[in-house]
Image (tube, rainbow, N blue to C red):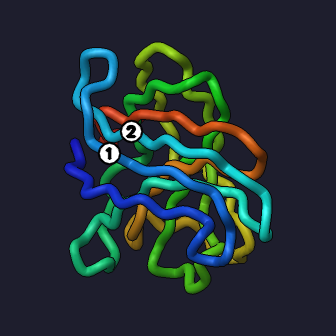
Amino acid sequence: MQLNPDWEFVADTVMGGVSTGHARREPVAGRDAMRLTGDVSLENDGGFVQMAFDLQPDGGGFDASGWNAIALEVRGNGGAYDLRLRTEDLTRPWQSFRSAFVAEPDWRTLTFPFSGFEPHRTDARFDPARLRRIGVLGIGRVFHAEVAVGTVRLVNV
């Protein structure tokens, strides 16, 4: 199932950090994409730039239990990024389910099985029936982030 995300940009400035960037819809190497760029800084306890979207307009849960993975069409600067999922069971902004990936300089489709996501700062188990938010982050080190996402799909592998 192809998703039609309404991406938004978020940086560590929401909690006092100084990372900068933006997310824009634009052509990237011949494809319509959402492109996240920015400079990640660790100053003031910061360290991330992100583009993310809610699966429901009201921010509530979406039942993704009919699928077992997410497929992203991605291209980037060769850097390491995170794909992060949030469910209705997570109540704190620092909680998530995470999977790392490298955004190579050529367009590639990467598939992330739900079973491969690691819980971060939560004891909750990932429940695809309560999926709420999907995000792509440049995080945790000083670097220039540049990653583009063409399509986002729920798939079975």
Image coords of residue 85 (percent x, y): 51, 60
Q: Residue at x 55, y 20 (%)?
A: 104
Horizontally, residue 109 falls left or right of residue 86, namely left
Q: Which of marks 1 and 2 is nearer the N terminus?
A: 1
Q: Nearer the viewer, residue 92 or 42?
A: 42
Report helix, strand or loop for mark 2: strand
Image coords of residue 138 (percent x, y): 61, 46
- Asked whether the viewer can see residue 17, the reply is yes
What residue is disc 2 on?
35
The amino acid sitting under disc 1 is Arg
Q: Which residue is drawn at 56% across and 85% down?
A: 91
Q: Which residue is drawn at 78% across and 57% down?
A: 42
Image coords of residue 114 (percent x, y): 52, 50
Q: Nearer the viewer, residue 80 or 146?
A: 146
Number of numbered callouts drawn: 2
Is there a contact, CB below 8 Å, between mark 1 and mark 2? yes
Residue 24, label in figure: 1
Horizontally, residue 56 falls left or right of residue 130, namely left
Which quarter of the rendering shows the N terminus? top left
The amino acid sitting under disc 2 is Arg
Between the C-alphas of marks 1 and 2, the distance is 5 Å
Q: Could you say which quadrant of the image residue 94 lies in?
A: bottom right
Image coords of residue 96 (percent x, y): 60, 66
Q: Could you say which quadrant of the image residue 64 lies in?
A: bottom left
- Asked whether the viewer can see residue 116, the reply is no
